[in-house]
Amino acid sequence: MFTLIRTSYWRRTLVVAAVATLIGVQQTPAMASEETGSLKAKDVKELVAHAKSPADHMKLARHYTAEAVKHEAEAAEHTALAAEYAKHPPITAGKHPSGPNTADHCRSLAEHCQNLAKSSRALAAMHEEMAKAAH
């Protein structure tokens, strides 16, 4: 009986994962890339190593700008969570003040994401300047 329940659980889990995958496939990576400017890691490596034209540098600038936007959104999310945890701290917050699900933890993640966004914006600006210089 226990094996049947466990098998049924895994079967259901696989079906849910398959459906989620199919739903996520509706927007192809190429479409996502065109809309946001994000590039795949291998494309970023290639462009960083061989970018010479203004178009190459602007692709990198758009990619880093998209990364900055993503990190800023994550920072905002963690800032909002920190505010909620500060209002309603979990029972374990006194024992583990910087543990997961605490305001300090969320503030730390927000700061980290803000730093990533700042670095990404700096890289975007650098590649915009390199694009101007490549004319």
Image (cartoon, helix red, strand yellow):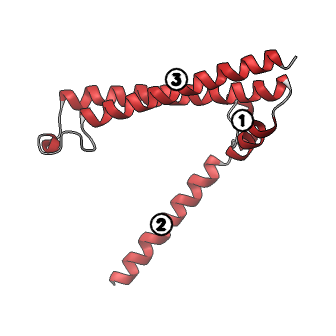
- Of marks 1 and 2, the one in the foreground: 1
Note whether 96 is above or below 22 in the view shown: above
Residue designated by label 2: 12
Q: Quadrant of residue 102?
A: top left
* Identity, as a three-letter code, of the amino acid under mark 1: Ser
Residue designated by label 1: 33
Cα gap from disc 1 to disc 2, whole angstroms: 32 Å
The reply to whether discs 1 and 2 touch (Cβ–Cβ < 8 Å) is no
Give the SS element for disc 1.
helix
- Of marks 3 and 2, the one in the foreground: 3
Q: Earlier in the sequence, mark 1 or mark 3?
A: 1
Residue drawn at 76 percent across, 21 percent down: 130
Residue drawn at 32 percent across, 34 percent down: 106
Note whether 3 is above or below 114 in the view shown: below
Q: Quadrant of the C terminus?
A: top right
Q: Quadrant of residue 126?
A: top right
* Identity, as a three-letter code, of the amino acid under mark 3: Lys
Note whether 33 is above or below 3 in the view shown: above
Residue designated by label 3: 118
Q: Position of residue 22 (x, y in %)?
A: 64, 53
Q: Earlier in the sequence, mark 3 or mark 2?
A: 2
Left or right? Give the position of 31 relative to 107.
Answer: right
Cα gap from disc 3 to disc 2, whole angstroms: 43 Å
Q: Which one is in front, 123 or 16?
A: 123
Left or right? Give the position of 18 relative to 43.
Answer: left
Residue drawn at 39 percent across, 76 percent down: 6
Q: Position of residue 80 (x, y in %)?
A: 34, 26
* Identity, as a three-letter code, of the amino acid under mark 2: Arg
